[in-house]
Image: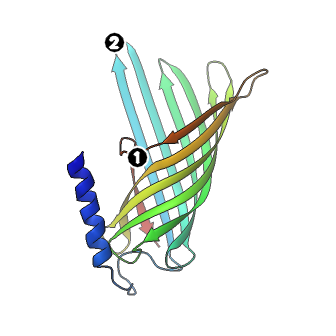
Amino acid sequence: MKKIILTVAAVFALTFANAQDKKEGSEGLAKGDLVLTGAFNFSTSKTGDAKTNGLTVAPGLGYMIDSNWAIIGQVAYLSTEVEDVKNSGFAIGAGARYFWTPASKFSLSLGGQLSYATTKNDATDVKVNAIGVEVPVGLHYFVSNNFAITTSWAGLSYTTAKADTDGAEATNTLGLELDMSSISFGLLYKL
């Protein structure tokens, strides 16, 4: 784990040291850029006869309001199935991100995002509504002028979720993730 952290730190140091001014048609981000983002997560596991499947499809749109700041919106489809009992729903989110070295191939970002999600259990018809706040950390690498591979993980998050039934109590979750155990990958396309 120490080697991974040192490698990431070295990449950041080299990126900051070699940052160059943005040129038209070059890699990286600049004021006025419109970007499409997306994430796709699929998981499946089986223990004996019990099978669990999960799927998330999350497209998004971002706009660079200046050379370092972007506003981002996202929608997502969520689905989990545990032993033939399915929960499915959608989520929406909006936020802002600050990019360090946005005009280079590598950039680091830190942001804030507010999200709302609702899911429904098909077996019981119970809906669960959740509101969350995240402070995501990200690393982005442009493989060409228009395409980048992105990673993100929530450094700090707070979620409150409540079932839509009489007498239900809210579940409040506060999380601080300083490792990369919940990292997610996605793609970015600069228009």
What x and y, as percent, mark residue 149?
A: 35, 60
User: Quick check: can you spot residue 141?
Assistant: yes
In screen coordinates, is 153 left or right of 78? left
Q: SS for tag 2?
A: loop
Between disc 2 and disc 1, whose residue precedes? 2
Q: Which residue is mark 1?
A: 178
In screen coordinates, is 2 left or right of 151? left
What x and y, as percent, mark residue 158?
A: 59, 42
User: Quick check: can you spot residue 143?
Assistant: no
Task: Mark 2 vs mark 1: give the one in front.
Answer: 1
Label drawn at residue 48: 2
Label drawn at residue 29: none
What x and y, as percent, mark residue 12?
A: 30, 66
Q: SS for tag 1?
A: loop
Question: Label 2 amino acid?
Answer: Gly
Q: CA distance from mark 2 to mark 1?
A: 34 Å
